[in-house]
Image (cartoon, rainbow, N blue to C red):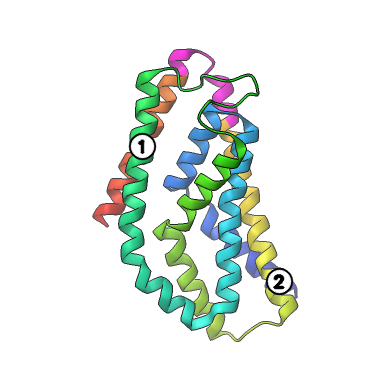
Amino acid sequence: MTAELLAGLLAGYSVAIPVGPVGAYLVQLTARTSLRVGAAAALGVATVDGVYAAAAMLGGAALADALSSALGGLRWVSVAVLIAVAARTLWSGLRRPAGQLTGNGSTREFGPARAYATLAGLTAINPGTVIYFVALVVGLRSSGTPSALGQALFVTAVLLASASWQLVLACGGALLGRALTSDRGRRLAALVSGALIGVLALKLALG
């Protein structure tokens, strides 16, 4: 069972550590809200990674075919969503201080539940995540099907690895938010983050 556990940790960190548009948005969201909101968003990302890992274990070749056929459409959906996120982030930086807080420590726009759902949705349609799990399905099935306990350990390890890394990103965002205490600093952070997300969306669109 150690092999499945180690494979799950490796898979979880492999998909989580490369910081793409979802990771950039997680850092930016935490910086302008709170660690509580960022932690909820981080768990949204990890939840989708865990669900994909479970589907990879249970779905086999049929899942790989379905994900592959949906990849082209998901790519453009993801581009459109990321452009919308970038535009909203840039607008918030131009319109008012990006970190305007309410009494409970989160922005008027985001609470933990909405942050969780937003980041889970972005992760689910992220082509990079889909491509990774298509490859994972093929690799797992080529080496045989693990036992039920082995599958459970693999999925749990993926979930824990992804959650731990996303929480590291959220903590980084929280530290950034504390460093940018002035209205100008928070506004600048929103503008830089929005521009970065927009560039990543353009890179995805151009392939």
Q: Which residue is mark 2?
A: 152
> Considering only order in the chain, which callout, 2 or 1, is on the residue closer to the N terminus?
1
Residue closest to the eye, 101 or 22: 101
Are discs 1 and 2 less than 8 Å apart at CB?
Answer: no
- Which quadrant of the figure contains the N terminus? bottom right
Whether residue 117 is visible, yes or no, is: yes
The circle on residue 135 is none
Check disc 2 and report its element: helix, strand or loop.
Answer: helix
Q: Residue furthest left?
A: 206
Instruction: Please determine whether, in this image, residue 82 is positioned above or below residue 178.
Output: below
Query: Which quadrant of the structure image shows residue 67?
Result: bottom left
Instruction: Please determine whether, in this image, residue 36 is positioned above or below residue 60.
Output: above
Provide residue 145's location: percent of width, then percent of height: 62, 84
What is the distance, in whole Å, between disc 1 and disc 2 at their CAs?
37 Å
User: The residue under label 2 is which amino acid type?
Assistant: Ala
User: Which residue appears at 27% of the width and 57% of the height?
Assistant: 207
Provide residue 185's location: percent of width, then percent of height: 46, 17
Q: Which residue is mark 1?
A: 86
Provide residue 155's location: percent of width, then percent of height: 65, 67
Q: Which residues are magenta?
A: 174-185
